[in-house]
Image (cartoon, rainbow, N blue to C red):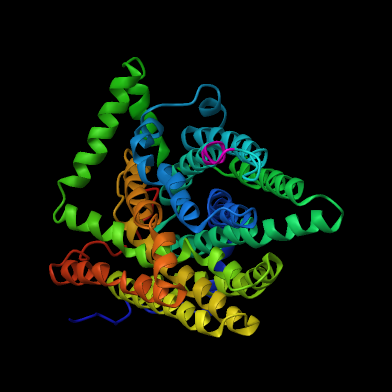
Amino acid sequence: MTVTTEPTAASPSWREAFAIYLKPRVLIVLFLGFASGLPLALSGSTLLVWMREVGVDLGTIGLFALVGTPYTIKFLWAPVVDALDVPVLTRLLGRRRGWLMLSQVLLMAAILILAASNPKFSPLTVVAGAALLVAIASATQDILIDAFRVESLDTTEQAAGMASYVAAYRIGMLVSTAGALYIVSGFEALGTGKDAAWSFGYAAMAGLVLIGMATTLLAREPARSAEAAAEHAAHAKDNPVKRVAVAAYGAFSEFLTRDMAVIVLAFVVLYKFCDAFAGTMTAPFVIDLGFTRTDYANIVKGLGLAATLIGGFAGGFVARAYPLVTCLWLGAFLQMSSNLVFTWQAYMGLNHWALAVSITAENFTGAIGTVIFVAYLSSLCKSPLHTATQFALLTALAAVGRTYLSATSGFLAKETGWALFFVFSAAAAIPSMLLLWWLQVRGHFKGLEPKAGVKADD
């Protein structure tokens, strides 16, 4: 196996590398990254902590990964976003921003519904339904943010944009995990009952959706939307169902007729699987070791946040300086190694400094791996007519590991114990590495590297 390690271009100076992060379009992508990362944990790990505290068993908690189904099938309604306009909002804000604002309004409402669905008193089917609404609205927002990011950034800004997006995405996740747990504990300290404190904590998270809405209002519509807007105008009188069907067919057929398309899609499914398989059970693992939710929040909020920021920007520098395939190999090995750190944590038990090391490693490697993976997915989307649908297809497939393949993680942890569970989760990286090798030796990555001087708006 030969892995190319030479830089693709001269490494930028520190001043140049820093300045690009202050460009308005990159800053907009940063805040949209936060908006995208915020809802995921609210129907995932944070909800699982709430459920575990009220006594829901591990098997049921593992099955709750299935409420993430919308993230895996969002490509089914992404053609609607590519093909149709939102009445009033599209006219006021533009094609991408109009849809984005609608998704954010729906997301805020869905989080408030989940805040009122207490797993201690409500049937678990009701809780699952409320979490599913959050996932649907969040997945729709992701469709729009991904398309906006790919279409709005110049080629020279893509690496910085991806680093900013991923770092902010992880911060959004930390806010809805550690931040939410702090808020719940704060309400309890003020004398609020535990059940009400959890509901108030979720309501506070709904309020943070306003950050994404404000960013949408301040952003400019991508220049590349003009091409799609002209296409919409030419077919404005066509049946909407026909327009969606044509958009879907065009997006899927264009991608699936590419060389090695099936292998590429399998690689997309499996690349983040080992990370997702372990991540699904991290919060219950920490609680089972005897740590309090405040212990977990303190470490995630502090060291986890710092590691996420450093890892995200490190991933951006790596993605900008080295060939894509080299970056993917690095991300794969880092993800595998971070899972093995939790095996060590299982043996260390209730040890705060060991947990600090484990959480730091998880966030640092996860941020680097995600930046690199998003760079790869972005390189596969080339037409503004199909950006939302194709990127939704790719990210939906990437979520298969988190949603379906990880659904049995609770049962596996229950049968094997935590130490062996994380060994198995690390081994889950091997299939993606085999596919990465196969794609590399057959030249898949030639032509995917960005070309200097080419702008996203050209």
Dominant SS type (magenta): helix
At 40% from the left and 48% from the top, the residue drawn is 457
Q: Which residues are magenta?
A: 123-128
Give the x, y percent position of residue 67.
46, 45
Position above or below: 403 against 336: above
Q: Outermost residue, right direction?
A: 190
Give the x, y percent position of residue 101.
57, 35
At 41% from the left and 51% from the top, the residue drawn is 150
Give the x, y percent position of residue 408.
38, 57
Position above or below: 54 against 250: below
Give the x, y percent position of residue 37.
54, 54
Report whether residue 451 is seen.
Answer: no
Report whether residue 81 is seen.
Answer: yes
Question: In the picture, residue 109 is in which quadrant?
Answer: top right
Q: Is residue 144 magenta?
A: no
Task: Locate residue 438 relative to residue 168 in the image: left or right.
Answer: left
Q: Is residue 124 magenta?
A: yes
